[in-house]
Image (cartoon, grey):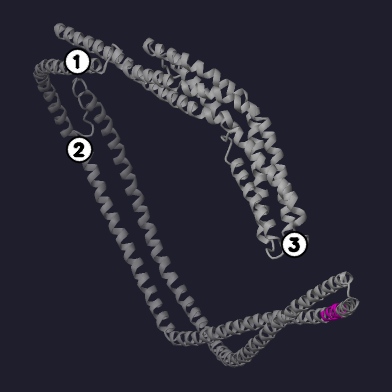
Amino acid sequence: MSTNNSLISAVGFLILATGSGAAYTGYNYLQGVAQDTFMLKHAYSLQNSIAQAVYLTERAASDSTYVPELEALEAAAEKAISDLRAGDPVRGIPPAPPAVQANVSALQSVWSEVGQSLAQIISRRGVTDQYSRNLADAGRAAEEALRAAQNGTSRLDSKAVNPEVLKRLNGAVAMLQDGTNTVTAGTSTPVDTIRAASALFAQYVSELASLGTQLPKTDAALPLLVKSYRDASTAQVLIQRAIDNSSGATENIPHAKSVWAARDRISAATIGLIASVEASPDARPYGARLVAGLTGLTLFLAITGMFLMRSITTSRTAQVEHKGYALESSTRNKSKEMRTLLTEIGQIADGDLKTTLTESNESTSDIAKELNRLVQSFGKILDDVSQTIAGLAAATEQAVVTDRNVTQNRTEQEEAIAHINQLFKTLLQFINQIEEMTASTETTSGKMLTEVDRGEQAVTLVHENIITLQQHIQAIHHRSKHLIESFQTLENISSVVRDVAAKTSMVSYQADLIAQQVDDKAVAKSITTSASSMQRLSQETREAVIQIQVVLKEMNDAALETQRAVLNAQHETDQLRDRSTSAQLALSGISAMTNELSTSVEKVIEGTRSMKENSSEVDHTMSAIVQYTVANSASSEQTAGAIKAVNAQAQGVQKLIAEFRREPS
């Protein structure tokens, strides 16, 4: 047995050793995989951030809106380099191995050179931002000027403008459009091109100023051209400010070019870093094969130990069987003691309750003690049964007394039945009165139903008249709306007449001017006379228009009052229709309730008839009750006889118990 224990201990020690080795190598392998994943993730993130920063540098050099994104990319690259060097202590990831550290140092040296140029571009963000804002404001002002100029030229009356002036104006607008396209092209536009655009704006302002005196003053296009002139002047000022602030953006260009020139070196350094990170798993001493080998060896030793334990268990089973044979011999001795116990129990079963079981045998000692206590308890139960039989004899005497009381109760029940019969006769008279009242109620409900039908017909007729009235009011409402629309048309006509009067006055004024310039006095006098007539006509037309407007206003107010009255009448008729609808519903409900009342009255009449028919059966029921009381008395007598028989049987049980408890011979 000691040899088996030594083998089990040795196998257990080997399993523990190989399991510990598998756990240690597996843990190191998983840590290495986590470190490789961490480094590879940050290496690709570093490559992506640096590439985006390089490609974004040229835009950020001339447009400050890209500077925050460039700063974020630079910070992301610095963080990735720091994480590759230091690892992640929180997650338990150690710093990068020496091979990766060397590539990180090489990349950092190149990135430091690029970082100086990036810092210069970022530091001039304020100047670049001002340049971008001025250029954007100039673009918006130029677009407003171009839009106003195009709208103004489209509204010019070509007949009233000299063709040469119109041609020069269109050429100036074309120059303005070219300058606007240049300014709105974005911050990547060279400064020299923007200076050329500023010259185009200056030419447009100068050309428009020279053409202003040759354009008609009363034309609707003149305000738009004036607005275009002001917006173009504003755009020219803003472009000059942008040119003044362009020095910072110009200084950023060499730095952006230096960053762009270093992109091949940066790309080579990042590729080398990623290659070293991808090759790091092959340099570790703990690989997947070693972990799998130790795990397989641990499983093999565990299975071997299981079979060894099975062999030891088989030998132990044989030892247990040997002990079972020894136990069988001791069981034979116990069976002899058990037969002695059964013999003594048989004596107790024969009625000898004084017998005491042997408690000295080892195997049956506990059973004998419990049975001796049980026999004593059974004797006490037999004593209780004897007392119960004595009580049953006393109950028999009480049953005889109860029989006599039942005979007396039968006489009292017969008197009560006679009294109940008298009550039923009184109830029959009350039923007759109810029948008369229900007949009267049925007649009244019929009359009420007739009156409700008449009221419902009258309300229906009123409801129909209300609907007809609503239709007439609706027609009046539509006609008043058409009348108001006609008044509005007349107002438009009066407006046209007023415009004609105004134009007539203008023509009269122009005729006076022409008369002053004409040398022929006769012609001038005729023109003056015509102008005076036209002036009087204009004055009379204005007065007529004013009177027409006053009359139209009064008529329109009257029509609006009529429409409001129609709307009020329509509102009142709607309320009246709702009330008539409610009255119809109420009358329908009353009619339904009357029908239900008639139905209920018919049910009451049928119920009273049924009660009268059933009242004739009361006498028969009373006779049956009398017969029941007689039968109950007979049953009481039979019960008394049965109790006496039970008492006799109890006496027999008493004798049996006395025989069972006889003394031993």
Q: Is residue 601 left or right of residue 132?
A: left
Of badges 3 and 1, the one in the foreground is 3
Relative height, residue 283 to residue 565 (above, below): above
**What whole-number distance in Å separates the C-alpha atoms at marks 3 and 2?**
147 Å
Amino acid at pointer 3: Asp
Relative height, residue 638 to residue 201 (above, below): below
Which sits earlier in the primary sequence, circle 3 or circle 1?
Answer: 3
Q: What kind of secondary structure does the magenta stretch mostly adopt?
A: helix
Q: Residues within 10 Å of mark 3 (few under 14, many from 20)?
A: some
Which residue position is annotated with label 1?
A: 297
Give coordinates of residue 393: x percent, y percent.
Answer: 34, 53
Give coordinates of residue 474: x percent, y percent.
Answer: 66, 84
Quadrant of the snapshot with the N terminus: top left
Q: What's the magenta region?
A: 537-548
Relative height, residue 399 to residue 189 (above, below): below
Give coordinates of residue 582: x percent, y percent.
Answer: 63, 80
Element type at marker 1? helix
Q: Is residue 120 left or right of residue 560?
A: left
Which sits earlier in the primary sequence, circle 1 or circle 2?
Answer: 1
Element type at marker 3? loop
